[in-house]
Image (spheres, rainbow, N blue to C red):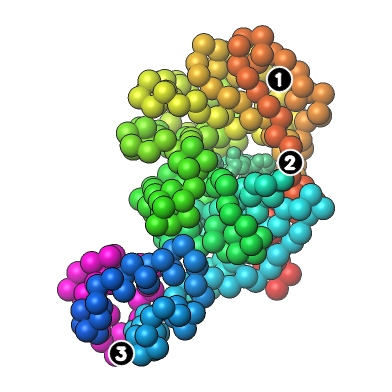
Amino acid sequence: MTSQSTTLSSQNAAPRDVHDLTRGELLELLAELKQPSFRAKQIEEWVWVRNARSFDDMTNLPKSLREELSKRLTLGGVEEVARQGSVDGSRKYLLRFPDGVSVECVGMPSRNRLAVCVSTQAGCAMGCAFCATGGAGLTRSLTSAEIYEQVMHVRDDFNTRVTSVVMMGQGEPFMNYDATLEALRKLNSPEGAGIGARHLTVSTCGVIPQIMRFANEPEQFTLAVSLHSAVQKTRNALMPGVRKYSLVNLYNAMGEYVNKTGRRPTYEYALIGGINDTESELQALCDFCEGTLAHVNLIQLNEVEGSKLRPSTPERAQDFVRALARVGVEATVRDSRGADIDAACGQLKQRVTRGR
Ligand code: SAH
Ligand code: SF4
């Protein structure tokens, strides 16, 4: 705390970003500048609700205060370095943070809704065989503000309210738990984006200790778990990063999650021809889900350049839907939005990096 306050008032230390200040630190700074404390609320509204791009935009603050703030603090500063638009209206963005690290996010509009998909890390350490992000390893985790700012960037670009957010971009949210949770809370808060907790979804590859932690959070956030196979050997090969969390333990953890929260989790299952779409794989998936509260999202694999893995056929996806229905489990085939814009996680980033 002491070193942080010094940073705020010192002339030669690197300025901190206003997003990273606690309410207490902001009040401390305002006191130092002999400003009334209600300014803190005004500043926070500009930062979190209106997504102001410069201190000079904060028109209800005295000019002298705006100047002082811009001398002492930075104000976010994601820069859009690439974008792609899909024929279905989706837009995918590559955003760069001030340290040069970049991540992807996607806006998916439909009628009066806008869903946003954000990244929680730049890269990912989990190394899933079918994932463009997994191939490149982890660069760094994002801060909660960096996760939040992606949503606001998309909101401002579409100029409409965001109705839901999924953390299904790059990275494993549960390997960056605290920042992810803080971002979820800010997205949920009326002093932030004001999005209902049920419309905020975290997708994890199955980091069991954090699933248990998540079950104990008071908010009704939604949980998706990337399953991709209910056969241990296949899952180990596809998702080496979660090898130590066995399917049996995952099954038990999800049982506890449902008991604790009463909420229905989603299992993500990308159908890969000849790998996890065989009869025995289907049977194992039915066994895993039967009698539990679950929804299965069947996804057509997005092909990743340089990978031998291929999507299975649409007919096979329908076989899965029917077989799951027979054991009382609802399944949907997710329409692969933005298939024409490198929508699979990590693909836009790969292309831009290669093009350099
Ligand atoms: N790390 C988290 C969230 C980001 S990945 C997780 O793994 O759940 C978001 C979703 O995209 C996951 O369900 C992931 O398995 C899926 N995914 C990754 N690469 C894919 C591809 N090539 N095709 C289809 N889905 C993919
Ligand atoms: Fe990481 Fe998720 Fe990609 Fe696996 S699928 S490498 S956990 S981002």
Placement of 79 over or under 278, stated as above or below: below
Q: Is residue 333 one of those drawn in magenta?
A: no
Q: Which residue is mark 2?
A: 336
Ligand 1: does it lie within 8 Å of the C-beta at label 1?
no
Contact (Cβ within 8 Å) of mark 3 with mark 2: no
Q: Which residue is mark 1?
A: 321
Which is more N-terminal, label 2 or label 3?
3
Placement of 150 over or under 171, stated as above or below: below
Q: Nearer the viewer, residue 97 or 287?
A: 97
Horizontal arrangement in the rendering, residue 196 relative to residue 234 (left or right): left
Mark 1 → mark 2, Cα distance in angstroms: 16 Å
Q: Residues within 10 Å of mark 2 (few under 14, many from 20)?
A: few
Q: Which of the 4 image quarters holds residue 309?
A: top right
| Residue 289 pos. (x, y %) | 55, 17
Ligand 1: does it lie within 8 Å of the C-beta at label 2?
yes
Q: Is residue 273 visible?
A: yes
Q: Which residue is mark 3?
A: 12
Residue type highlighted by circle 3: Asn
